[in-house]
Amino acid sequence: MEGIIKKYQQKFRKAKEEMGRWDELQSRLLSQFSSASAIIQRLQVLQNSKNYGALTCVQGIEDSVLAKQMESLQVILLGMNKTLEDFCGVCTTLEKMARDGAQLIKGGSSISSAKQQQQGVGIKPSVAVCLDGLRLLSEMHRSEYD
């Protein structure tokens, strides 16, 4: 029984790492969104030739500046798409850990009855609590991603 609890502890350590990764991804996505929003807000201003003042004497400056901003926006949007894929990866990892945790119980372990699953080992949580925790983490992150 203690061996299974140790395996669940490893899973929770991995889940904690994934949740840290989730937090980093959220920060990155917010930063990307902020950058994209700033560019989108500037586009209207950049299309008005009155806003270039003395720079209007430089041939093609308006088109060049607008093109650079559009390129930057495209790079940011591609980065946001990659960030969303990374979120999906975290969800998939958490779901796999929850499935693997359930498989620990079903896969011929010595803990077969519901009563045994509810038993704790010292101050450590029971197998049922561990399994429910992994499932809950997976569901929470999936619902936030979707």
Image (spheres, rainbow, N blue to C red):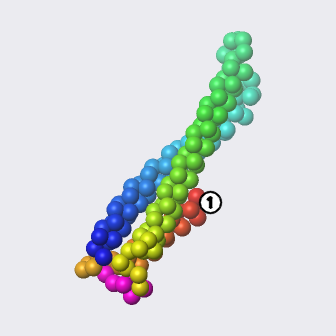
Q: Taking the image as drawn, is residue 108 in sight?
A: yes
Residue for point 61% across, 33% down: 75
The one nearer the camera, 138 or 128, is 128
Q: Which residues are magenta?
A: 114-120
Residue 85 is situated, as x and y percent measured from the top left of the image, at 57, 48
Residue 138 is situated, as x and y percent measured from the top left of the image, at 51, 65
Residue for point 29% across, 70% down: 3
The one nearer the camera, 95 or 1, is 1
Work out whether 130 lies above or below 91. below
Residue for point 53% across, 52% down: 89
Residue 12 is situated, as x and y percent measured from the top left of the image, at 37, 64
The one nearer the camera, 37 or 58, is 37
Mark 1 burial class by Cα count in 10 Å: few <14, some 14-19, many 20+: few
Is residue 132 rendered to the left or right of residue 146? left
Question: For the C terminus, which image quadrant?
Answer: bottom right
Is residue 45 rendered to the left or right of residue 141? right
Secondary structure predominantly adopted by residues drawn in magenta: helix
Amino acid carrying mark 1 in the image? Asp
Residue for point 41% across, 74% down: 108
Taking the magenta stretch, the answer to whether it contains residue 115 is: yes
Q: Quadrant of residue 64?
A: top right
- The residue singled out by tag 1 in the image is 146
